[in-house]
Image (cartoon, rainbow, N blue to C red):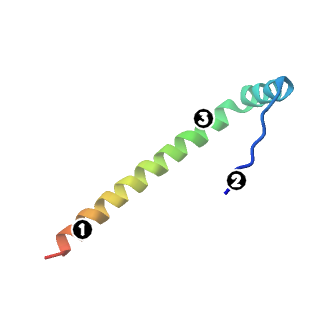
């Protein structure tokens, strides 16, 4: 499967910098939320694996 991507030039980099400066706090909250979801999913998988091993003779 071929991946599509774009390389940003100087203008694109400036636009990205402006966006991040204006929305940095929102992006930070989103990243923290994603990290918390990953931790919760890891914890759930760990519990499922343990419970499965307890149920098998």
Mark nearer the viewer, 1 or 2: 2
Mark nearer the viewer, 2 or 3: 2
Decide: is 4 above or below 51. above
Disc with the residue nearer the chain's start (3 vs 1): 3
Decide: is 57 above or below 49. below
The label number, if any, that marks residue 2 in the structure image = 2
Q: Secondary structure at mark 1?
A: helix
Residue drawn 66% across the image and 37% down it: 26
Disc with the residue nearer the chain's start (1 vs 2): 2
Residue drawn 41% across the image and 48% down it: 39
Residue projecting furthest to the left: 57
Q: Quadrant of residue 1?
A: bottom right
Disc with the residue nearer the chain's start (2 vs 3): 2
Residue drawn 72% across the image and 29% down it: 20
**Label 2 packing within 10 angstroms: few (<14), some (14-19), many (20+):** few
**Label 3 packing within 10 angstroms: few (<14), some (14-19), many (20+):** few
Residue drawn 36% across the image and 59% down it: 44
Q: Which is nearer the eye, 6 or 40?
A: 6
Left or right: 57 in relation to 45: left
Residue to which mark 3 is pinned: 28
Q: Secondary structure at mark 3?
A: helix
Residue to which mark 1 is pinned: 51
Left or right: 11 in relation to 48: right
């Amino acid at each position: 499967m071929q991946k599509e991507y774009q390389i940003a030039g100087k203008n694109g980099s400036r636009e990205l910098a402006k966006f991040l400066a204006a929305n940095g706090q929102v992006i930070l909250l989103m990243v923290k939320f994603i990290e918390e979801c990953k931790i919760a999913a890891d914890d759930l998988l760990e519990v499922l694996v343990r419970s499965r091993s307890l149920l098998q003779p």
